[in-house]
Image: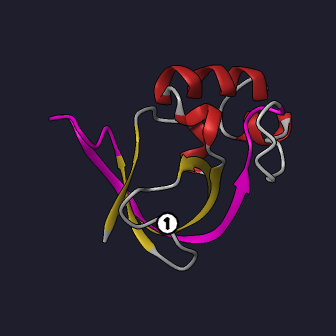
Amino acid sequence: MRILGFSTMWPKLQQDTVTTFRFTRKDRDWVTGEVVQVVYRPRSKEREVLGVATIIGKESRDVTPDHNLNAPLVSDEEARADGFRNHLEMGLWLLMAHGKRFWIEPMNKLTLRWVERY
């Protein structure tokens, strides 16, 4: 079972279904139906396993209209559901966190449903 990590304890993690935006994995991308272990601070000594979830949806999204990546643009509503004020704030955070990938790749919008919470 692969780990899906979060660096922030977002309020959305308390909901029954959770959406999150992730770049495509280089080894093996996320797939609908995959069961994942959800972890807070996965690369820290204070790592906390939050539970197990199933990926119930995967959609391609673009973060900025300048890309022309043939994917729908992240809406302000989706960005707010992800914990940001709007898609501009989300885009700035992604740019700082992921650098050039932000400019050349669409993102996966993953929808998770909890199987078990710890």
Label 1: which secondary element: loop
Q: Residue furthest left?
A: 45
Which percent across, then down, holds residue 44?
A: 21, 34
| Residue 118 visible in the snapshot | no
Say how many tags the image has. 1
Residue 15, above or below 66: below
Does 42 appear in magenta? yes
Tell me the colour scheme of the image. Answer: secondary structure
Which percent across, then down, holds residue 41?
A: 31, 37
Residue 115, above or below 11: below
The type of residue carrying mark 1 is: Trp
Q: State the residue at coordinates (81%, 42%).
A: 68
Residue 47 picture quarter: top left
| Residue 84 vs residue 49, the one in the foreground | 84
| Residue 100 vs residue 90, the one in the foreground | 100
Report the residue marked by disc 1. Answer: 30
Which percent across, then down, holds residue 53?
A: 47, 67
Q: State the residue at coordinates (57%, 28%).
A: 94
| Residue 92 visible in the snapshot | yes
Q: Quadrant of the N terminus?
A: bottom left
Which percent across, then down, holds residue 75?
A: 84, 39
Q: State the residue at coordinates (45%, 32%).
A: 8
Q: Quadrant of the C terminus?
A: bottom left
Q: Determine crowd level at label 1: few under 14, some 14-19, many 20+ residues with C-alpha closer than 10 A.
A: many
Does 53 appear in magenta? yes
Residue 84 picture quarter: top right
Magenta span: 40-65
Left or right of 115, for residue 73 = right
Left or right of 52, for residue 93 = right
Q: State the residue at coordinates (82%, 43%).
A: 73
